[in-house]
Image (cartoon, coloured by chain):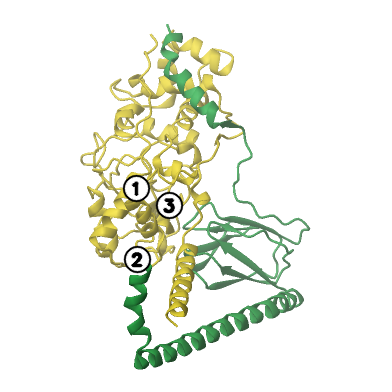
Amino acid sequence: MMVKKQMKMHVPVVSNPSVMKLSRKLSVWVMTYALLVLLALYLASCSTASHAPLARANASAVGSHSMTLSDHEFAPVDFVPQPGDTITIHNRSDISHSIYVTYPDGNMVNLGVQTPGTTVHWQVPADAKGEFVLQCWIHPIIRANLLVNASNVSSSSFKSGLPKLTRQEILNGRQNICSSRNRRA
Amino acid sequence: MLFRHLVLIISTLMVANTAWSANLPPREKFKRPDSIPAPLSNPLTLEKATLGKTLFFDQRLSRSGGMACATCHSPDQRWSDGRSLPLQAEGVKHARRTPTVLNSAWLSALMWDGRATTLEAQAVLPITTAHEMNFDLASLVGRLQQIEGYRPLFVQAFGDDSISQQRITQALASFQRTLVSNTSPFDRWVAGDEQAISEPAKRGFVVFNNKEKANCVACHSSWRFTDDSFHDIGLTSEDLGRGAKVPAQVTLMQHAFKTPSLRDLSIAGPYMHDGSIRGLKAVIKHYKSEAIQRESLSKDMQKFELSDLEESDLIAFIQSLDGGALNIQAPVMPQ
């Protein structure tokens, strides 16, 4: 009964020639727009896929390297920096960063404020030798250690693999602590 | 024809909904950890935490014998003091509100300006600060050595009854590491219980994460709702905060303070490092448009608009982070 009623209500609207014409036009526009968006997305993805490896290959050939910031950490470093190399840091996170480099002699170089989506550059000194530490003024947890003129490279992030209590142990411990007055003189 | 239009509209709505959902971080990003971290140099043990608890509540850790750690970090006040500025802070230049010690096991920078990097190092500061406990650790060791009842506690914690500065700070740090927020309604929602938080709270979660809206998550991230980092949020205080601890040319750190956690907040406040704002509505008002525009202002802080409904939703969400008071009573003091 209800279905019949609804059909009756709709019939006059659908059968109106001017509305139908308008609907058809609207549909064509929507479909065209959707196709254009899809085409643009496809081209964008093709562009990224084809250029990214090329950029990396070139960077490696000319002594340039890339580092990436994602939220609160550097992505693992996969290169060995040499004196004179240029390192480009990409901020791929949604937050701003402010990276500084501490040199082996304790001097510091600020790379400035880096808003989301932007890059900054740092050139490894020509006479560099030793450990250079990259940190963020805003987010002290962000850290990467670069060894120049050395074979070992590391990127650390203060992750603790240290003794831990499970949640149940925490709760048990809390209960024991709460009742600890009974153990005291 | 109408059917086709309906299909088109529904498809469009589905796509829009997917896009909207994609902007939200996955709930797992806010999942509580299963264990408490502790440094290798001070493994967490029940015995050390027990000793630390006694020390934490003992007023004899202050020179006058009238102030304990728990005087300002009170279990009844969510391990803070409920005051805008601490006791005895009148006349102290740039005095700062007492932060909670809840969930401090996970902190990588302690104190509002991050001047301590471990709980062990931090434990020394209030004991030795003139307007706080105003004592020195050498005298404190001497005083505790005179208290017979402490000996068995040190034996249980460290194997013998020797009392040292290091053992005192290690025990205090160990107790503080056991102060972990109770499971909140939000935690249960993250774990999959869809009914754990209200619909307004769920909408508030969207406002909290929406870059075009409050975007609180830019700094209040992780399961503790802090990034353990430093930001100038445009308060009128002249306190340089982190800026006084880093080279002067680092403009961004001028007036910057550590992001506080949003868990287990006292709903009435006070809030901010200087205790200058009371009530969550006033906090939202500040972030919307009242921050001082200056070079050091956090780049992640942009003016935004919220409707009354969005504001109340955001507050409902923040209230869902409250797991309630910990069931911890003050111990009997050793004599």
Which residue is identified by label 1? B198
Local SS, label 2: helix
Tell whether label 3 touches label 2 (CB within 8 Å). no
Chain under numbered label 1? B
Tell me the quadrant of the picture where the N terminus of chain B can be found.
Answer: bottom left
Left or right for A122, reference B6: right
Question: Are marks 2 and 3 in one subunit?
Answer: no
Tell whether label 2 touches label 1 (CB within 8 Å). no
**Amino acid bearing label 1:** Ser
Q: Which chain is yellow?
A: B
Residue B245 bears which disc, if any?
3
Q: Position of residue A48 (x, y in %)?
A: 64, 78
The Cα–Cα distance between marks 1 and 2, rounded to whole angstroms, is 35 Å
User: Can residue B239 be seen in this snapshot?
Assistant: no
Which residue is identified by label 2? A2
First in residue order: circle 1 vs circle 3: 1
Q: Position of residue B305 (x, y in %)?
A: 28, 66
**Amino acid bearing label 2:** Met
User: Can residue B74 be seen in this snapshot?
Assistant: yes
Closer to us: mark 1 or mark 3? 1
Closer to us: mark 2 or mark 3? 2
Residue A52 bears which disc, if any?
none
Q: Position of residue A66 (x, y in %)?
A: 65, 69
Closer to us: mark 1 or mark 2? 2
* Label 2 crowd bin: few (<14), some (14–19), many (20+), radius 10 Å: few
Q: How many marks?
A: 3
What residue sits 68% from the left and 61% below the top? A77
What color was chain A assigned in the picture? green
Local SS, label 3: loop
